Image: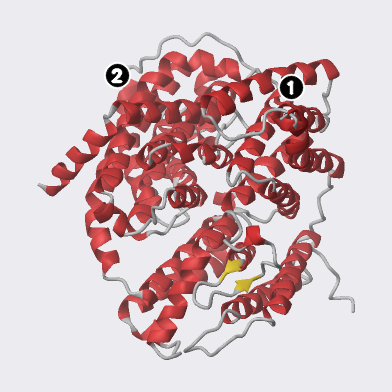
Amino acid sequence: MKGLAIRNHRAFASGALFLAFATFFFVTALQYPAGTAAKMGPGYCPRLLAIVLAAIGLVVMFGAMKPSAGREALRTWDFKGLAWIAGSVILFGALLFPLGLVGALFVLIMVSSRASHEFTWKGALTNAAVLIVLCLAVFVYGLGLPLPVWPSLLN
Amino acid sequence: MDLFHNLAIGFATAAQPANLLYAFFGCLLGTLIGVLPGLGPLATIAMLLPITYALQPDAALIMLAGIYYGAQYGGSTTAIVVNLPGESSSVVTTIDGYQMAKQGRAGVALSTAAIGSFFAGCVATLALAALAGPLTATALLFGPKEFFALMILGLILASVLSSGPFIEGIGMVVLGMLLSLVGTDLNSGSQRFAFGIPQLFDGLDFVPLAMGIFGFAEIVKNLEQDDKLSLVTQKITNLFPTREDFRRMVPAMLRGTTLGTLLGVLPGGGAVLSSFASYTLEKKLSRHPEQFGKGAIEGVAGPESANNAGAQTSFIPLLTLGVPSNVVMALMVGAMNIHNIHPGPEVMTKNPTLFWGLIASMWVGNLMLLILNLPLVGLWVKLLTIPYRYLFPAIMVFCSIGVYSINSGTFEVYEAALFCVFGYILIKLQLPAAPLLLGLVLGPAIEENFRRAMVLSRGDATVLLTSPMSASLLAAAAIAIILIMLPTIRARREEALQE
């Protein structure tokens, strides 16, 4: 089929993303009773919306294959940067209780700083020191948020 | 008169020392954020939401509102001085504002922007106060089907006005509505899409999602493009516009204010749309269109008035109808919910001091910004010299602590990390995130009103089209869709919305 080549890869992927979410929500919603239009169950609206989203996804995907669709490639991805940033947040969550706020913030700042192309140890360490002091002053002593400041072993 | 009586209540609230202080904080923070590129009012409001737990509701909202319009001021400062729009609403200001700065008229451009914004702020505050009563009265007549139709119209307009293809915007709205279904179904009490995770029983939290997408994912995007800032550091002298400048800027300001006030009320409208529309209008009306792009003062005065007016009047649909018209307003819903205030027609009757206090504080805030901004320009510009590699870990830290403080639990932290990945996918696919958030915020109310309307009509969906009010609202939504499909308008829209 010559006419059905994917011309707009960006739009095609977007449509596929919609379709994937729609399928997931529709299949999960099958467990919930749908009811009738007059007496809707918890599953009625999810099914309705999932069908609408699936339709939109298909329209977008077909639109990307139309001969009139403009050619567009997928953009390049920076998985490393994403991994440093998302990873540092996960580490913060995992280490907050075992290490306390000071330790978890230190890890967060050092790991996320690595995402920058201009990373230097000295710069990141200084930044970490300044930010940790600032956070303690603002959040812990200023606003009095209930945060575990020191490692749980010390308490 | 009622209006003045109400405004008097408002000013009494806004003028309380504590509220003045929070308005000041909000304006200061907002300006700071507006100045720093890569950190928008969205991420900031999301970041500061948890901090407002400790505040009184009126103080919290006054501060958050201050951040929003403070950011418009700050954004224009950097647009003029260093050709960097700190905010998307000041993109157009870079065109002529920076040219004026290059001609040594940075001071004049800055004061034009400030005076225009202040004037627009005053008018928009009055418009807000005047329109609030009648609109609230209308909203009180609304039943479930009218509310359903109104929210559908809002979501359609928001997707029409978001960047990128319209159909993808609608897809994001529907996806947001699906995500809003997570949690307990209020009618049956059963869990949906919660997979036995107790933290999801109350629904998907708004703040981790907003921070993941607008905070963390934005950082990954900004780090990819490491273009260096070239600062044109020059002394800013001579703030005062000449008589000729005044003659040219006053009509532009009046037109910009009118346009912004009107467009701000539209769902999906607000500051960005207003500023673009005003620039186009000024260029069309000008007797010297060739000066635009080369330092025409109208190109600064019009859009700067328009974006501030639009920023302010976009509170109207939120406060009177309970329908947020843009993402910042959606975050305000989140802030109000934290304090157990449910935006809608009841706010004005149940919380008159909060309602009128917020409106009055906008005027107070604008005055503060006028005084705050001009003398501090030098300081703001200096802030721009902070390298991004020191700035973004600070954003990471504030976001992470903020996200943790929502429930004092780490679940939300992981959620934010997940939405960071999701947000990055959206950025790469160029899918607009704003409609997603609006769908997420409006989803529960839409489902509830839809179900109620269907119960009342015994399952007959045609009732949505036979009741005059809901039929006309849905017809307006249909017209918007048809218009956007017309090829000529489609091309114009793509031209206008690309940044």
Q: Residue at x 55, y 62 (%)?
A: B439
Amino acid carrying label 1: it is Ala
For label 2, the crowd category at 10 Å Cα-Cα, with few meaning under 14, some 14 to 19 and many 20 or more, is: few
Position of residue B258 in the picture relative to residue B206 (left or right): left
State which quadrant residue B242 falls in: top left
Q: Circle 1 sits on which residue?
A: A128
Element type at marker 2? Answer: helix
Instruction: Tell me residue B243's x, y (percent).
Output: 29, 19
Position of residue B216 in the picture relative to residue B8 (left or right): right
Coloring scheme used: secondary structure
Q: Residue at x 41, y 52 (%)?
A: B340
Viewer-closest of B102 and A115: A115
Label 2 and label 1: CA atoms lie apart by 51 Å
For label 1, the crowd category at 10 Å Cα-Cα, with few meaning under 14, some 14 to 19 and many 20 or more, is: many
Q: Are marks 2 and 1 on the same chain?
A: no
Instruction: Tell me residue A100's x, y (percent).
Output: 73, 31
Q: Circle 2 sits on which residue?
A: B243
State which quadrant residue A152 falls in: top right
Q: Is residue B431 above or below residue A152?
A: below
User: What chain letter is assigned to the residue under label 2?
Assistant: B
Numbered disc total: 2
Element type at marker 1? Answer: helix
Instruction: Tell me residue B381's x, y (percent).
Output: 56, 18
Does the image show residue B181? no
Viewer-closest of B489 and A107: A107
Does the image show residue B1? yes
Instruction: Tell me residue B168's x, y (percent).
Output: 64, 64
Viewer-closest of A74 and B383: B383
Asked whether the residues under the numbered discs 2 and 1 touch, taking CB atoms below 8 Å apart as contact, a structural biologist would say no
User: What chain letter is assigned to the residue under label 1?
Assistant: A
Viewer-closest of A149 and B202: A149
